[in-house]
Image: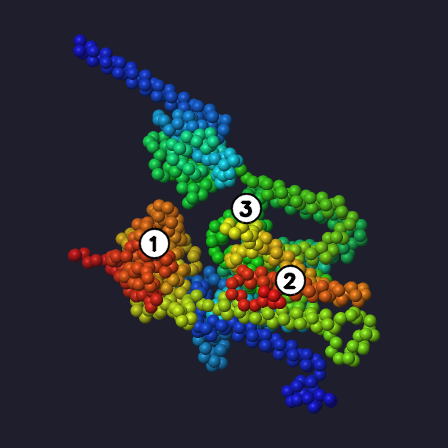
């Protein structure tokens, strides 16, 4: 034992057998990667506090709170009367419950073993926790595809890839946070099932698929990808009993399980998105049956039977398609058909899709911003996969190519792309390193051996050193890039705003929560709050008050009614507000601080949506522009705009405030103008509360006047 | 006597008004029959300046006229006019062949080069403009369609026509078979090729060609070709003051087509470098070739990656990292 003289720290490691060393190293690397995945997502908690971000997560948080308190059956039957007053909303049947059930389960287990953590902290830290689970699953998945080395590289890359971090930082409590974990788990188990052909793995895969369906609508991608894999295996002549067993059981069990989710219901057997899976299931049975016949019959008999069968089934199918087209059941040559082939069709022709920022196509710079090194290591990995094709490799190739296509169409689907990018890049990086690490001359002893084997060339060692150095510096740059992107771009909760002050210090605007807590403390429990729909989820979750409309924009006429109230004059709006029992009105105003996404900037949408229904047909967008067609809030602005409710609520008392040095009173710092209507009083409203930086202003709707007066 | 005179005067009066009335009636029926006759030949009636004044502007009328004032000649370079004209034709044809077709409504057009005086009299200096001339009275403010706000899709024009005239025209678009035809052609071409090579279908199982296809899709997507396809940016930008060409869009919000090609090239070069590094190791040849290949691969990777990084830095102001050179 030469190593016994080594210092204490390394001694115990080297005393172990090589297998044990190997396992220990892998475990350590994987643990470090998982911890890294968790901790790199905590920037926002460190910069701000343990707070939930954005809008939708507040709804998820509220439902989780309800589930944790009242139990699953009450949650399932929950009719929510605090939103969409006076209509209400059935929550249980209109959401994917996986996220809430997961965090409620974690909450209950932790509290059962006396770790007293509250629901909000569970929600805030759920996405980072699942990110570290995803890291482990990525390792397992890549190990199935190539080897443990590639798995470790892929896992460490996934831990910090910005494309995934963007949707899983602490506080972004949304479906995608756990859905990526479910998706990769399902893929891992599917590859395992396809490799072994065992019922055990197939059933596990179906269960993972069920979890996926329960947590995210993106499961449709998954239920099309697996059949595509099976189909391509059939075409390449790789179809076998293993695939048959795996796919048949996954499809049957998975479909039945997925139909248990109330929100999904009968879609898996009715809607066109799921038909590919059904078709491939049928094809599997036919393929297996043909194989069976082939094994029993002679070649001539089989050929005759096969030809006649193909002819008959072909003509039957053609006839059925013709009849269905004639009867108008299917219409294959409509725009919808093209939108399947060319996703940009929908973008160009359907404005609702085009207007949402998440639905924009992806520019090359966002690919680079979110993936950096992976942009070109991904094709390298793909090249290695192509050079050694297996059933599992075909799967990852299909996943890679389809997901990059979809993420090119819609920037939001970068999330689905990021894991496969990491996996294939992991394979690529580890293959390059594997090849050239062997060429390094570590000791003179080995050098002699290599010279004997005649596999050498001049400068071999130097080139190997160069390659390893380049790879190392690439990986180091990748970590720097990811950390920089995460801290700069993806760690700001939109509910707390920051700005740089004059002395380069950070100013924090916490006005939203200030206003919501004011509502919670100072208004009647059953008060109804009117605001634009963006803030609905936050008001119900934090202020616990009833809202008229929220981010689940299911009822357009109701939203339109609120838009009409905002766009009308005070007395017209008063009628609408009385009709809807409004007690308080809340507006977001950025004119004092320069916060640009405030209600005045959103106002044109209120006008458009308000004017889009019958009852609001008197509201015309053109009336809110100047004759030159401009939207202005200064003196030249349209008088209808200067006297509508939204304008008055935003600029009430603003005319006497100095905002910027050298500018007159009432200078709006977002629109950069002096407002046009300064001196007015409110008739049907009274100011109830305005937050510190005037970001949120709350008004109370006055009661009807006494009749005697 | 005076009575007689009076009666005579009255008679004359009556006969005069009668004849005037008759003349009016005649001119009205003439106009209608004229318009109908033209309309039977063409769904959109082309008017010159004189015809416009006679048939559209001068009373009496019992019909509404929709006029598209446009400039279709290619020397006017009005591409919007052509699109608007197509939509207008769809609407006019829908009206022409619909069951409610009557002589209450006519679709007409005036080209600037055939009646510039019409544009002057209406004080128009833009095209296309859609105007409605009601059966009675002068056109009001709403009788000019606001195409800046609602666009000029045939459905929008039909809605506006219904608002102004209470005549509902159901727009019938002739189905567009060109996409279907192209698709069928493509499929039959592929099918034909496969049939011709039916004895040698091995190339379908050649993984190299499939691999190259997959890589091509990836390079196209990561360089933002889908963005180009949907947004249609310019090839490059020329600074009007200095005349300098900009190949790279200065902000991360946009991109030029040229820029995406450059990025695609850089990405491909890096990947080719890596593939060469691998091939250098696996191929069976003498050491010299291996060494050259490995060195070239290494150089490719290092240089083109740093180039890619500098292109990205020029888009993202404040990006702190660089490699080899700035």
Along the viewing direction, whichever of A168 and A431 lies nearer the viewer:
A431
List x then y, in percent, for residue A125.
Answer: 49, 73
Disc marking residue A633: 1
Residue farthest along the front direction in this orientation:
B242
Label 3 neighbour load within 10 Å: few <14, some 14-19, many 20+: few
List x then y, in percent, for residue A357.
Answer: 48, 57
List x then y, in percent, for residue B198.
Answer: 76, 47
Along the viewing direction, whichever of B272 and A402 lies nearer the viewer:
B272
* Residue B6 seen in this snapshot: yes
Q: Secondary structure at mark 1?
A: loop
Name the chain letter of the residue that bears numbered label 1.
A
Disc marking residue A335: 3
Does mark 3 fall on the same chain as mark 2? no
Which numbered disc flags the more N-terminal residue, 1 or 3?
3
Name the chain letter of the residue that bears numbered label 2.
B
Q: Residue, x 72% and y 57% (percent of image)? A: B208
Residue B203 vertical position relative to residue B321 in the rendered view, above or below: above
Residue A674 vertical position relative to residue B156 in the rendered view, above or below: below
Q: Secondary structure at mark 2?
A: helix
Q: Residue, x 68% and y 46% (percent of image)? A: A314
Q: Residue, x 43% and y 59% (percent of image)? A: A552
* Residue A128 seen in this snapshot: no
Label 1 neighbour load within 10 Å: few <14, some 14-19, many 20+: many
Residue farthest along the top direction in this orientation:
B1
Alpha carbon distance from label 1 to label 3: 42 Å
List x then y, in percent, for residue B64.
Answer: 39, 31
Q: How is the image coloured?
A: rainbow
Does mark 2 fall on the same chain as mark 1? no
Q: Give residue B52's quadrant in the image.
A: top left
Residue at which label 2 appears: B304
Alpha carbon distance from label 1 to label 2: 51 Å
């Amino acid at each position: 034992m030469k190593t016994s003289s080594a210092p204490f720290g390394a001694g115990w490691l080297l005393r172990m057998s090589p297998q044990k060393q190997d396992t220990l190293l892998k475990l350590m690397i994987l643990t470090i990667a998982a911890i890294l995945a968790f901790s790199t997502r905590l920037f926002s908690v460190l910069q701000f506090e343990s707070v939930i971000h954005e809008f939708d997560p507040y709804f998820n948080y509220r439902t989780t709170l309800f589930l944790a308190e009242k139990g699953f059956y009450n949650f399932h039957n929950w009719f929510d009367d605090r939103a969409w007053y006076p209509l209400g909303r059935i929550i249980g049947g209109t959401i994917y419950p996986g996220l809430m059930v997961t965090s409620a389960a974690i909450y209950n287990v932790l509290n059962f073993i006396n770790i007293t953590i509250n629901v909000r902290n569970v929600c805030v830290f759920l996405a980072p926790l699942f990110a570290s689970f995803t890291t482990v699953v990525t390792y397992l998945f890549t190990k199935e595809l190539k080897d443990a080395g590639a798995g470790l590289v892929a896992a460490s890359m996934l831990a910090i890839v910005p494309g995934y971090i963007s949707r899983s930082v602490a506080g972004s409590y949304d479906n995608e946070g756990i859905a990526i974990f479910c998706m990769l788990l399902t893929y891992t188990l599917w590859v395992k099932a396809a490799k072994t052909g065992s019922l055990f793995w197939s059933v596990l895969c179906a269960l993972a698929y069920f979890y996926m369906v329960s947590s995210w609508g993106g499961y449709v991608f998954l239920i099309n990808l697996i059949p595509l894999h099976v189909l391509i295996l059939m075409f390449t002549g790789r179809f076998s009993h293993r695939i048959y067993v795996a796919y048949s059981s996954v499809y049957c069990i998975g479909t039945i399980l997925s139909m248990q989710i109330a929100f999904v219901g009968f879609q898996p057997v009715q809607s066109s998105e799921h038909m590919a899976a059904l078709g491939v299931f049928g094809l599997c049975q036919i393929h297996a049956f043909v194989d069976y016949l082939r094994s029993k019959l002679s070649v001539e008999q089989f050929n005759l039977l096969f030809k006649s069968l193909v002819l008959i089934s072909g003509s039957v199918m053609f006839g059925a398609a013709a009849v269905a087209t004639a009867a108008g059941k299917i219409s294959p040559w409509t725009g919808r058909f093209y939108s399947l082939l060319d996703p940009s069709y929908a973008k160009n022709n359907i404005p609702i899709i085009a207007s949402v920022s998440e639905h924009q196509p992806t520019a090359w710079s966002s690919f680079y911003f979110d993936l950096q090194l992976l942009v070109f290591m991904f094709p390298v990995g793909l090249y290695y996969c192509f050079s050694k094709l297996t059933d599992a490799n075909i799967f990852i190739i299909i996943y890679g190519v389809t997901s990059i296509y979809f993420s090119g169409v819609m920037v939001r689907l970068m999330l689905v792309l990021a894991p496969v990018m990491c996996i294939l890049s992991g394979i690529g990086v580890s293959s390059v390193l594997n090849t050239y690490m062997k060429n390094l001359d570590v000791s003179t002893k080995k050098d002699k051996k290599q010279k004997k084997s005649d596999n050498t060339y001049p400068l071999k060692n130097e080139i190997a050193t160069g390659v390893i150095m380049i790879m190392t510096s690439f990986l180091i740059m990748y970590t720097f890039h990811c950390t920089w992107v995460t801290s700069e771009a993806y760690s700001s909760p939109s509910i707390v705003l920051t700005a740089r002050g004059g002395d380069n210090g950070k100013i924090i605007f916490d006005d939203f929560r200030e206003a919501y807590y004011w509502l919670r403390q100072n208004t009647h429990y059953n008060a109804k709050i009117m605001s634009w729909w963006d803030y609905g989820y936050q008001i119900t979750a934090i202020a616990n008050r009833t809202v008229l409309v929220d981010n689940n924009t299911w009822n357009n006429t109701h939203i339109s009614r609120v838009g009409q109230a905002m766009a009308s004059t005070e007395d017209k709006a008063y009628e609408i507000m009385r009709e809807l029992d409004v007690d308080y009105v809340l507006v977001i105003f950025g004119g004092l601080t320069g916060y640009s996404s405030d209600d005045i900037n959103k106002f044109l949408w209120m006008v458009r949506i308000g004017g889009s229904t019958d009852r609001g047909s008197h509201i015309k967008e053109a009336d809110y522009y100047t004759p030159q067609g401009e939207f202005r809030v200064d003196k030249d602005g349209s008088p209808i705009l200067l006297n509508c409710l939204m304008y008055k609520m935003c600029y009430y008392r603003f005319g006497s405030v100095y905002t910027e040095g050298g500018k007159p009173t009432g200078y709006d710092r977002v629109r950069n103008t002096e407002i046009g209507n300064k001196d007015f009083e409110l008739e049907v409203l009274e100011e109830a509360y305005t937050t510190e930086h005037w970001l949120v202003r709350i008004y109370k709707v006055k009661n009807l006047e006494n009749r005697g007066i | 006597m005076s009575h007689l005179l009076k009666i005579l005067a009255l008679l004359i009066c009556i006969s005069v008004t009668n004849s005037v009335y008759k003349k009016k009636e005649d001119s009205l029926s003439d106009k209608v029959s004229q318009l109908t006759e033209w309309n039977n030949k063409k769904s959109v009636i082309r008017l010159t300046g004189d015809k416009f004044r006679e048939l559209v502007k001068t009373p009496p009328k019992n019909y509404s006229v929709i006029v598209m004032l446009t400039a279709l000649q290619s020397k006017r370079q009005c591409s919007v006019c052509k699109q608007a004209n197509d939509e207008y034709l769809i609407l006019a044809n829908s009206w022409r062949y619909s069951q409610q077709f009557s002589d209450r409504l006519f679709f007409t057009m005036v080209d600037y080069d055939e009646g510039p005086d019409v544009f002057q009299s209406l004080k128009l200096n833009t095209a296309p403009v859609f105007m409605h001339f009601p059966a009675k009275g002068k056109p009001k403010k709403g009788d000019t369609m606001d195409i800046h706000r609602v666009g000029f899709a045939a459905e929008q024009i039909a809605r506006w026509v219904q608002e102004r005239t209470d005549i509902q025209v159901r727009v019938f678009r002739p189905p567009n078979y060109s996409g279907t035809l192209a698709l069928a052609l493509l499929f039959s071409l592929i099918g034909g090729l496969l049939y011709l090579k039916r004895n040698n279908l091995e190339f379908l199982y050649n993984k190299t060609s499939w691999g190259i296809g997959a890589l091509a899709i990836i390079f196209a997507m990561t360089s933002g070709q889908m963005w180009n396809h949907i947004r249609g940016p310019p090839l490059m930008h020329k600074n009007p003051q200095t005349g300098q060409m900009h190949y790279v869009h200065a902000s991360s919000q946009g991109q030029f087509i040229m820029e995406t090609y450059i990025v695609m090239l850089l990405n491909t070069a890096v990947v080719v470098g890596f593939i060469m590094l691998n091939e250098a190791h696996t191929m069976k040849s003498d050491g010299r070739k291996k060494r050259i290949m490995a060195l070239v691969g290494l150089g490719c990777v290092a240089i083109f990656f740093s180039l890619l990084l500098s292109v990205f830095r020029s888009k993202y102001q404040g990006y702190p990292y660089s490699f080899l050179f700035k």
